[in-house]
Amino acid sequence: MTDYAEEQRNELEAIESIYPDSFTVLSEIPTSFTITVTSDAGKNDETVEVTLKFTYVEKYPDEAPLWEIFSQENLEDSDTEEILSFLHQQAEENLGMVMIFTLVNAVQEKLNEIVDQIKNRREEEQSRKDAEAEEAEKVAFQGTVVTIENFLAWKARFELEMNELKKKRQKEEEQIGKIKLTGKKLFETDHNLDTSDIQFLEDSGNNVEVDESLFQDIDDLDLDEDDPDFNPLELGSDED
């Protein structure tokens, strides 16, 4: 008759000596303990970790122990489900033999595979991003392929913009033209300007009379305008 309690005690002592830093007894009846399993370091020292909780059943090892994931780090839900399924498979293959060491080693290998998978997923994601960036750069360099539809749409937008720009320029030119009208143009556009000064004088009552006799004999004067000493003011003083 198999002494299940003895086999369990012997395995527990062996497990404690193999995993002194990661083995923790939770209870003695029933015997329950945890073992923390960490993957080898991946790229950039990335690791994944899981703490497994095992509980002996009365007829272990002829019956599989109970197990669960007590805690985990850096694992996806799909990863933990995969580990639990893998433990079930390994336990079925090792019934009749103490199997905790075998199960822990199997999980260790599984974690190493997960680290490689994470690395591959990240490399694939980076490759995808690089490909998308390269494609975007090509599109930016080549420009948009011209079709009849997008050409007609561009032409309509272009003509609309040109019309708006033309209207704007015409308006600006009209404003500038109003500011820069010459004297001639002012008289041409406003015929009231040629009589405005006369009207101003008449309204002010300052009628100016000119004695034309003062200018009748001006042609008889001997005026030498090229003479540097010529001073028209002295003419009036000599006559006095």
Image: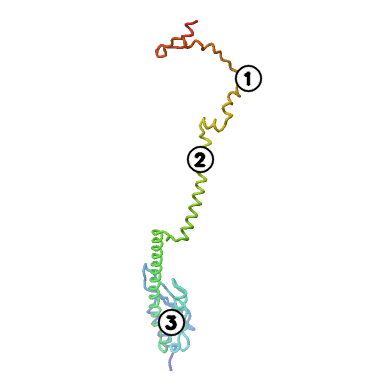
The x, y position of residue 38, in whole percent, is 40, 74
Q: Nearer the viewer, residue 219 or 67?
A: 219
Which residue bears the numbered disc 3?
87
Q: CA distance from mark 1 to mark 2?
A: 42 Å
Choose the circle earlier in sequence order: 2 or 3.
3
- Please give the residue where the numbered disc 2 appears in the rendered image: 173
Q: Write the residue at 46% across / 75% down.
A: 78
> Are the residues at dot 1 and dot 2 in contact (C-beta closer than 8 Å)?
no
- Which residue does the numbered mark 1 point to in the structure image? 205
Within 10 angstroms of label 3, few (less than 14), some, or many (20 or more) residues?
some
Side of 211 where 23 appears, left or right: left
Task: Of the two numbered discs 1 and 3 on the same chain, state the one appearing first in sequence.
Answer: 3
Residue nearest the observer in this picture, 28 or 223? 223
Which one is nearer the viewer's eye here, 74 or 134?
134
The quadrant in which the N terminus is found is: bottom left
Q: Position of residue 201 (x, y in %)?
A: 60, 21
Q: Amino acid at mark 1?
A: Gly
Q: Earlier in the sequence, mark 1 or mark 2?
A: 2
User: Residue 190 at what x, y percent from top left?
Assistant: 57, 31
At label 2, counting other C-alpha atoms closer than 10 Å, the crowd grade (few under 14, some 14-19, many 20 or more) is few
Q: Residue 98, relative to residue 38: is it above or below?
A: below
Other-residue count near label 1 (Cα within 10 Å), few / some / many at <14 / 14–19 / ≥20: few
**Of labels 1 and 3, the one closer to you:** 1
From what the image shows, is residue 232 above or below residue 106? above
Q: Secondary structure at mark 2?
A: helix
How far apart in space, not on screen, are marks 2 and 3 (Cα)? 87 Å
Q: Secondary structure at mark 3?
A: helix
Alpha carbons under labels 1 and 3: distance apart: 123 Å
When the figure is inspected, residue 18 is found, relative to residue 6, above or below; the finding is above
